[in-house]
Image (cartoon, rainbow, N blue to C red):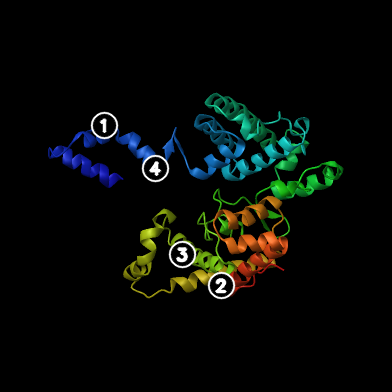
Amino acid sequence: MELTLYKADECYKDGLYDEAIVIALENRDKIRDILNKYRKGLKVDYEPYEANGPLLGVFDLYATDRIVHKVDALGFDAIEFGNLASWVFELLDVGLLKPEEVGIDKPIFDILDYETDDDILKNSEYNGKLVMELAEIIAFNKNEMGKILSKGIRKASMILNEKFKERLKDSNLPFNKFNDYGVYVPFGEQGAISPTMYWAIGNFMPYIIQGKYLTYYQCGVFLEPEELAKLSVERAIEEITIENLGICRFHRKWIYPIIKSLVREVTLEDIDLDSMAYKLIKDITTYDKKLGGYPPYIESHRVKDLIVAGAEEFGNDEWALYFEEEGENKLKEYLRRVMDEYSNLLGIDWRIE
């Protein structure tokens, strides 16, 4: 980007310019902010704006601005908070939580209420205010529910399943546990993380390292389990390698094919980067297992639906039929095959029991 603006400057000085170059130079600061994804002094990335926008029934960018700035100022991870808040909103919408228990009003969470532009703006503003109220309740533990929700979706679900077990029994809802409404990847006994905001099957696999794109996260494809594992391992090795060399992952497309040559030129040594990445993953696996870590089977009905529906949505008719005919048993087989191949390729034991 800076090189482009520099060249535009040079062309202008040499008298080689047109209207486009003049406009670019006059708006260089705005262009720089746009290309660097800056807006109102803060970085604007897809994931936090998706998690704290459409996921919450907020479809107005300015309302989302306020939410993201608020949760950031309170010290939350914006993606994790938005995912948590959307779970709370749905629980309020279906009646498993009551407004007086949470401390906020019921959100507008029916897509039929968003038919016109006026509806979108009005409801986005309304839901946005609720989100910011919820953020303060959780951040400062203003009530009992705030304390529970501060533990995250998975731990909070365990508490709420017990606290409101009679409510769950009496409901006529399709899901019978609080965690069934959550979207998260479980880890060990109590750990969990929000997957990235892409409908990609690899995002829901309980791999050894979460939250760092060490998976195959291509949206719109449903692969055979062994192929998904293979591509996930390839991505993990690539991502770990460039990160440990201090290189921004946004440069991975051009840097990874030449990274070994560059390292050789700088160090004058033939360093086996792949072996180093594999060893690091093995060491992390050993460490995690000593702490009681393991890959649990999927706990959330919503995540199961995302995987099963993905087969049909992404055109894998064979697996869509398997899931339709054999249901959960076939889903368990799919996950076990992914994790078995993943373990084999990495030389670790990170299988679903």
- Reading the image, the residue beneath label 1 is 26
Q: Mark 4: which secondary structure?
A: loop
Q: Residue at x 42, y 53 (%)?
A: 250
Say few, some or many: other residues with alpha carbon within 10 Å of mark 2 (under 14 / 14 to 19 / 20 or more): many
**In the displayed structure image, the side of residue 209 where residue 330 appears, left or right:** right
Q: Is residue 283 above or below residue 181?
A: below
Say few, some or many: other residues with alpha carbon within 10 Å of mark 4 (under 14 / 14 to 19 / 20 or more): few
Q: Earlier in the sequence, mark 4 or mark 2?
A: 4
Q: Which mark is residue 37?
A: none
Which quadrant would residue 122 be assigned to in this image?
top right
**In this rendering, does residue 281 appear at all?**
yes
Percent from the top left, x then y, of residue 256? 39, 63
Percent from the top left, x then y, of residue 321? 64, 61
**In which quadrant will I find the N terminus?**
top left
Q: Mark 2: which secondary structure?
A: helix
Q: Residue at x 59, y 37 (%)?
A: 71
Q: Which mark is residue 238?
A: 3
Q: Is residue 203 above or below residue 112?
A: below
Q: CA distance from mark 1 to mark 3?
A: 40 Å
- Reading the image, the residue beneath label 4 is 36
The residue type indicated by label 4 comes to Asn
Q: Mark 1: which secondary structure?
A: helix
**In which quadrant will I find the C terminus?**
bottom right
Q: Earlier in the sequence, mark 1 or mark 3?
A: 1
Q: Earlier in the sequence, mark 1 or mark 4?
A: 1
Q: Mark 3: which secondary structure?
A: helix
- Reading the image, the residue beneath label 2 is 346
The residue type indicated by label 2 comes to Leu
Q: Given contact means CB atoms under 8 Å apart, are the residues at marks 1 and 3 in contact?
A: no
Who is closer to the viewer here, 55 or 36? 55
The residue type indicated by label 3 comes to Glu
The residue type indicated by label 1 comes to Glu
